[in-house]
Amino acid sequence: MAENGSGSRVDVTVSWATLFRVGLACVLGYFIVVLHRFLLLLVLALLLAIAFRPLMQWVANRGWPKWVGSLACALILAGSTALVCGILVPTVGSQAPAFVEKLPELKQHVLKWLPEGSRMRALATEALSQRPFSDPTPLLKRVMSWGGALVGHVIEFFVVLILAFYFVVDGERIYRWLIAFFPEHYRRKIDRTADEFTSVVGHYIAGNLLTSVLAAVYAFAVLQILHVPAAALLAILAGVFDLLPIIGFFLFTIPATLIALTVSPNAAVLVALLYGAYHLLENYVIVPKVYGNRLRLSTLTVLFWCLAAGLIAGVIGVIIVLPLVASYPIIERIWLRPYLECETLQEHQEIDDNEHGERQKPAA
């Protein structure tokens, strides 16, 4: 209750239904905060399951039973599990401590090949004056203690794979069960949105995994040929960081180049040049072939959302944010059209076509 300027009273009434909605929103927000890690893994599993949709459709188009597609997906997921348990985890566990122990040697090699009195040598001396480059023992102990965290991430990886498999098997039934809650006139729009969204997400996830594997294989071959130490570990870093747009290239190129300095300056230059050549090949040949023009995002958009997602949800957030952001034109065209000016949609379409080329227009 309040009084206005004329002295009359104004009554404000809040219904029990409103209070219930506010309370429900608070409870929902609390559970989102508490379960945010699980929710991120759930979204990641859903995106991974969507990447298997073309395989399931391919099986269905040939009239084969559904269990054939499910079995194929299970074999792929089992192969991923075997790869992690049989190669990645042992490699990281064995080569990471050896990598840390080589830090003092790395410092000596870097300073050895830089001219005395140069500005570059002064900057390198200042950067390499940290304790791990003179006494790596504390860092080595910390790396050895990361075993528990590594086990936790491996368990999360298994959870994502298991959830993804169940989404592949029961995803269609769950989708139809949920869509039944919506009025009939909304279901057609939801179906159109889901079809276009799964196309964008499927190509993005499958393409990202493919380019990541190619980056790891290429990096391992280059490092092995040049006899760079910890080649397997550095190749794994290349595969993992290749999942991160823009900044990922620098995160795996700089360590490989520095470690290559322990072999020779020529090796370091070759690593940098060969990594750079692959980066150009991936961006201008491999990625357009794999993604087509489905992921129509500008570099500034990618950088902005990657930074925002990284600050909010870490590496998982960076991985899942781009296909979600790339789906905005779908939302705009199907759901926001009645609320936007016709010129807005047309101008957005022209900007996208000029930047990324013409694409096949979806059915109305």
Image (tube, rainbow, N blue to C red):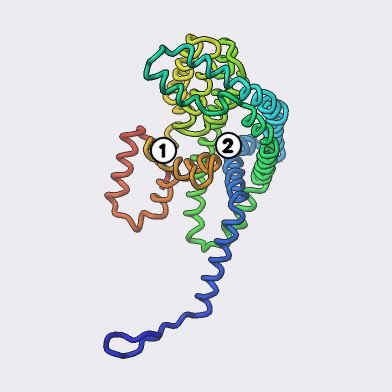
> Mark 2 or mark 1: which is in front?
1
Of 35 and 125, the residue lying toward us: 125
Residue shown at 67% from the left, 45% from the top = 163
Q: Residues within 10 Å of mark 2 (few under 14, many from 20)?
A: some
The type of residue carrying mark 1 is Leu
Residue shown at 67% from the left, 48% from the top = 170
The type of residue carrying mark 2 is Pro
Circle 2 — which element? helix
Determine which residue is flagged by label 1.
303
Measure the alpha-carbon separation of dots 2 and 1.
29 Å
Label located before the other in sequence (2 or 1)? 2
Return the x and y of residue 228 as percentages of the image width and height.
58, 14
Determine which residue is flagged by label 2.
54
Of 205 and 22, the residue lying toward us: 22
Return the x and y of residue 119 as percentages of the image width and height.
37, 19
Circle 1 — which element? helix
Q: Which of the image's four quarters has the N terminus?
A: bottom left
Note whether residue 72 is visible. no
Give the side of residue 132 with respect to residue 141, left or right. left
